[in-house]
Amino acid sequence: MLTCKPRKRWLEKIEAFRSVMAGDLKEEIEKGVGEDGKLLMKTVISKLSDLTEGKDLIVPDVGQHQMMASRFYNFQTENSFFCLRWSRDHGVLSADGNRRQDGSS
């Protein structure tokens, strides 16, 4: 039988890490561009979240796009983040699980 144990120390440690990083992260997002002059993905997603008030449906591409969207989009509604999976044979799996060999949705 599984039991639920409080993770107070673990959660406190995570919150401490977040507070240390918060200032630098906010500064990076506000700056908007990296050292190479290119737009930062976290800035684009954060600004999109601000513009939509976190209420739109989000369907990012695979991999890093999913991670960045889940981290920097401030979701305000349930069931508004949809991810597709990449299959072993490089066919795209749609949200309903049907594999598309041509990569179409």
Image (cartoon, grey):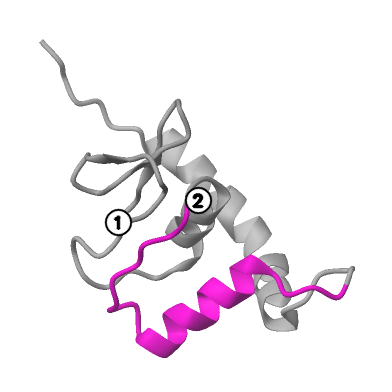
102 over 70 or under it: above or below: above
- The mark closer to the camera, 1 or 2, is 1
Mark with earlier residue (1, 2):
2
Residue type, numbered disc 1: Phe
Q: From the viewer's perspective, tell me whether residue 84 is left or right of residue 10.
A: left
Disc count in the image?
2
Q: Which residues are magenta?
A: 37-61
Was residue 69 drawn as part of the magenta stretch in this picture?
Answer: no
Q: Which residue is depicted at the point 28% across and 79% down? A: 55
Q: Quadrant of residue 23?
A: bottom right
Identify the element where label 2 is drawn: helix
- The residue that label 2 is drawn on is 67
Using a 10 Å C-alpha cutoff, classify the residue at mark 2 as few (fewer than 14 neighbours), some (14 to 19) or many (20 or more). Answer: few
Residue type, numbered disc 2: Met
Residue 27: x percent and y percent?
A: 72, 76
For the N terminus, the quadrant is top left
Was residue 57 drawn as part of the magenta stretch in this picture?
Answer: yes
Residue sitting nearer the eye, 65 or 15 = 65
Using a 10 Å C-alpha cutoff, classify the residue at mark 1 as few (fewer than 14 neighbours), some (14 to 19) or many (20 or more). Answer: few
Q: Which residue is depicted at the point 45% across and 26% down? A: 88
Residue sitting nearer the eye, 40 or 9 = 40
Q: Which residue is depicted at the point 72% across and 79% down? A: 32
Q: CA distance from mark 1 to mark 2?
A: 12 Å
Q: Which residue is depicted at the point 35% across and 47% down? A: 84
Identify the element where label 1 is drawn: loop
